[in-house]
Image (cartoon, helix red, strand yellow):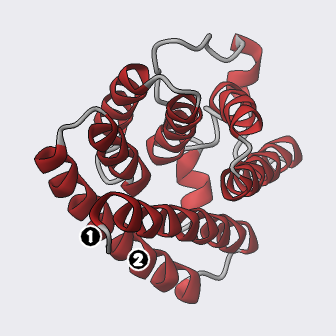
């Protein structure tokens, strides 16, 4: 299945961001402009991963907001949720756990199986003293991440479309960054 082509058809309207301009909604699937947009969005995913790994929170928020606004027409709800997850991370690191928890909950509602959303929710729950909920949420995050990594490796191994291979590779790099954050949170909050 050519997932990059399916992604074009999936839109998610998420409160707080202006919709894509009407004239931008008519990119023809497979056209040179569409392929360029997909490549640009993959680049933004890689840039978010780099900012995340560098703990450059202001850049992470800026890139994620841009991605959420500019890539709706070529990214599915999983990717849009990831953008909002990264916005929530940046805000959490900025010292506003209440806003971060709300954003994590919104992210989970957008796409439940986003491991990063659950990891962020767990971290925020730890910060506000809701330890039991946080432990449970961290376990959910780890299980979702492990399953997603296995699924993306399988997709990557079986894919023949270069654009889809590039997308799956970017997702794997992003999931690896989330897994590293889960490991750091376990050490920080649980002493493991």
Locate residue 154, reporting x and y percent: 46, 85
Q: Nearer the viewer, mark 1 or mark 2?
A: 1
Residue 143, label in figure: 1
At 59% across and 43% down in the image, what residue appears?
75
Which quarter of the rendering shows the C terminus? bottom left
Circle 2 residue? 151
In the image, 67 versus 139, the foreground residue is 139
At 28% across and 32% down in the image, what residue appears?
128
Q: Secondary structure at mark 1?
A: helix
Q: Secondary structure at mark 2?
A: helix
Residue 144's place in the image compared with 43, above or below, is below
Residue 28's place in the image compared with 170, above or below, is above
Q: In the orientation shown, which residue stands out farthest toward the front? A: 191
Residue 54, label in figure: none
Cα distance between the residues tagged 1 and 2: 12 Å
In the image, 102 versus 172, the foreground residue is 102
Q: Residues within 10 Å of mark 1 (few under 14, many from 20)?
A: few
| Res 174 quadrant in image | bottom right
Locate residue 111, reporting x and y percent: 35, 43
Q: Residues within 10 Å of mark 2 (few under 14, many from 20)?
A: some
Left of 127 or right of it: where is 166?
A: right
At 33% across and 57% down in the image, what residue appears?
189
Residue 22's place in the image compared with 95, above or below, is above
């Amino acid at each position: 299945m050519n997932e990059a082509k399916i992604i074009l058809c999936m839109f998610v309207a998420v409160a707080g961001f202006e919709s894509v301009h009407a004239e931008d909604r008519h990119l023809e699937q497979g056209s040179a402009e569409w392929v360029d947009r997909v490549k640009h969005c993959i680049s933004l995913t890689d840039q978010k991963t780099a900012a995340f790994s560098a703990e450059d929170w202001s850049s992470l928020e800026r890139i994620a907001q841009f991605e959420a606004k500019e890539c709706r027409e070529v990214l599915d709800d999983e990717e849009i949720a990831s953008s909002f997850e990264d916005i929530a991370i940046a805000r959490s690191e900025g010292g506003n756990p209440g806003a971060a928890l709300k954003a994590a909950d919104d992210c989970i509602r957008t796409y439940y199986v986003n491991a990063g959303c659950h990891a962020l929710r767990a971290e925020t729950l730890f910060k506000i003293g809701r330890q039991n909920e946080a432990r449970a949420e961290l376990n959910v995050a780890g299980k979702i991440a492990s399953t997603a990594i296995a699924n993306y490796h399988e997709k990557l191994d079986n894919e023949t479309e270069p654009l889809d291979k590039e997308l799956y590779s970017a997702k794997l790099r992003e999931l690896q960054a989330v897994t590293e954050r889960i490991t750091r949170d376990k050490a920080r909050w649980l002493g493991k």
